Image (cartoon, rainbow, N blue to C red):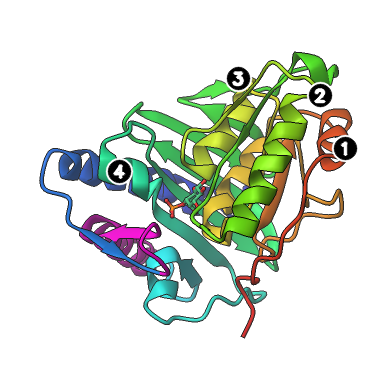
């Protein structure tokens, strides 16, 4: 049977590539910074322009679909997942990197139908790497198949994580205590490239074994979750329970053994759900 969402996925790849070009061009010019929830939660004109471009381009082809986008939600649009086919978009994942010219910046496009992820596209635009994952059909980077690492010994792992943008000292303490415990298991190293979408794609590629973060949003992880699953990895909650796209918590790993070992060390802290009223 023909894939009902092939045309949508092809369009997502084309739109992500064009959006990446816009970001690369903007990197050459002045990047005017604005703040959202705090002085470290940044947004730029580029985030807004790229999101408008992506929405308009997809809406033209798929007018009945729903949309959740980082900048539209910031502007007051609802962040509610319904049964309708829904595009979940982060136009510039790694805005802080973009502002500073730190070269990991991604366009992230996830597509969910009846609340089930169908495909994910992550375009790491400075590296020119196009990661894709289609439910049941595998994950790819620039057309080459992706496979997670086969490591089962936690001591031989690299784990990615991020400090996020919450500067509440109690939260920062929990983040550091978790990183400290994980480092001291011991593991080979802790990394983080400043974009959830690329951190997840690195798990899918087998370059690192796991990535976890509390405080991310659905648009940061919707695409990456499909890519990791399709590369053979696992996606779950930081407490080991099932992954919930709206919970603002994610743990992905190459396998269950590594994931459940990490769960034991993660100090969970509250983060208001994306779909909270
Ligand atoms: C960012 C994430 C990053 C996380 C930041 C932020 P943005 O997304 O990808 O991993 O640590 O808090 O959510 O805001 O650059 O799209």
Instruction: Give the mark nearer the N terminus: 3 vs 2.
Output: 2
Q: Report the front residue among 257 and 4.
A: 257
Do the residues under discs 3 and 1 have CB atoms within 8 angstroms? Answer: no
118 lies left or right of 131? right
In the rendered image of this protein, does residue 250 appear above or below residue 271? above
* Total numbered circles: 4
Classify mark 3: helix, strand or loop.
loop
CA separation in Å, label 1 and label 2? 13 Å
Where is mark 4, residue-wise? 98
Where is mark 3, residue-wise? 207
Where is mark 1, residue-wise? 260
Disc number for residue 185: 2
* Residue beneath the point at 40% across and 66% down: 38
How crowded pointer 1 is (Cα within 10 Å; few <14, some 14-19, many 20+) is rated as some
* Residue beneath the point at 44% across and 33% down: 130
CA separation in Å, label 4 and label 3? 23 Å
């Amino acid at each position: 049977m023909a894939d009902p969402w092939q045309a949508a996925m092809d369009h997502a790849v084309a739109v992500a590539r064009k959006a990446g070009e816009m970001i690369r061009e903007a990197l050459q010019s002045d990047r005017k910074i604005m703040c959202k929830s705090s002085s470290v939660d940044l947004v730029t004109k580029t985030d807004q322009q790229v999101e408008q471009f992506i929405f308009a381009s997809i809406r033209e082809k798929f007018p009945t679909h729903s949309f959740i986008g980082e900048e539209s939600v910031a502007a007051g649009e609802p962040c509610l997942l319904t049964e309708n086919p829904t595009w979940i978009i982060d136009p510039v994942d790694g805005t802080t990197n973009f502002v500073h010219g730190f070269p990991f910046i991604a366009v992230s496009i996830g597509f969910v139908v009846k609340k089930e992820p169908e495909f994910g596209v992550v375009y790491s635009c400075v590296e020119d790497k196009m990661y894709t994952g289609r439910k049941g059909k595998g994950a790819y980077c620039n057309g080459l198949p992706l496979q997670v690492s086969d490591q089962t010994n936690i001591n031989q792992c690299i784990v990615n994580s991020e400090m996020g943008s919450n500067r509440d000292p109690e939260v920062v303490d929990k983040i550091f205590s978790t990183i400290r415990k994980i480092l001291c298991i011991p593991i080979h190293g802790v990394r983080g490239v400043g974009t959830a979408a690329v951190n997840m794609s690195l798990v899918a590629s087998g370059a690192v074994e796991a990535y976890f973060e509390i405080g991310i949003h659905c648009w940061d992880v919707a695409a990456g979750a499909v890519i990791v699953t399709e590369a053979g990895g696992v996606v779950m909650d930081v407490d080991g329970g099932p992954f919930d796209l709206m919970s603002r918590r994610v743990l992905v790993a190459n396998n269950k053994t590594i994931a459940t070992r990490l769960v034991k060390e993660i100090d969970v802290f509250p983060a208001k759900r994306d779909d909270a009223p």
